[in-house]
Amino acid sequence: MHPDRDAYLAEIAQRRGRSTLHELDDAEIGRLVDALADRLPAGEPVVETDAYTLRTGAVPG
């Protein structure tokens, strides 16, 4: 949970070493932040969710 759009965007801009965003260069990160700023409402909290699937299993035998 982020208190507002600007806090979320600041965190996205610094996330490079903690996720797949590390593959993006500075210009690409800037474009991502700009695109998110266009889509997120100002002055409202941002709830970030991640959709992951974890599969486990056992080898038969």
Image: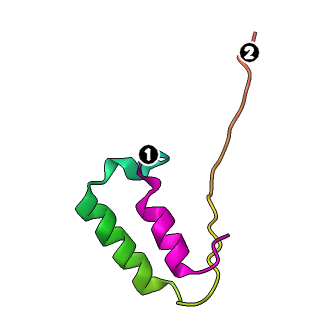
Label 1 to label 2, Cα distance in Å?
Answer: 38 Å
Picture coordinates of residue 17, whole percent (x, y): 43, 45
Q: Mark 2 is on which residue type?
A: Pro
Query: How many numbered marks appear?
Result: 2
Picture coordinates of residue 28, whole percent (x, y): 27, 62
- Specify whether 34 is left or right of 18: left
Say few, some or many: other residues with alpha carbon within 10 Å of mark 1 (under 14 / 14 to 19 / 20 or more).
Answer: few
Identify the residue at image location x=74%, y=15%: 60
Against 20, is 33 above or below?
below
Q: Main secondary structure of the magenta part?
A: helix
51 or 1, which lies in front? 1
Q: Mark 1 is on which residue type?
A: Gly
Say few, some or many: other residues with alpha carbon within 10 Å of mark 2 (under 14 / 14 to 19 / 20 or more).
Answer: few
Against 26, is 35 above or below?
below
Picture coordinates of residue 27, whole percent (x, y): 23, 63
34 or 54, which lies in front? 34
Picture coordinates of residue 10, whole percent (x, y): 47, 68
Residue where numbered disc 2 is placed: 60
Can you name the residue that lies furthest to the left here? 27
Q: Is residue 13 magenta?
A: yes
Query: Residue 17 bears which disc, if any?
Result: 1
- Specify whether 24 is left or right of 57: left
**Region in magenta:** 1-17
Against 24, is 61 above or below?
above
Which of disc 2 and disc 1 is earlier in sequence? Answer: 1
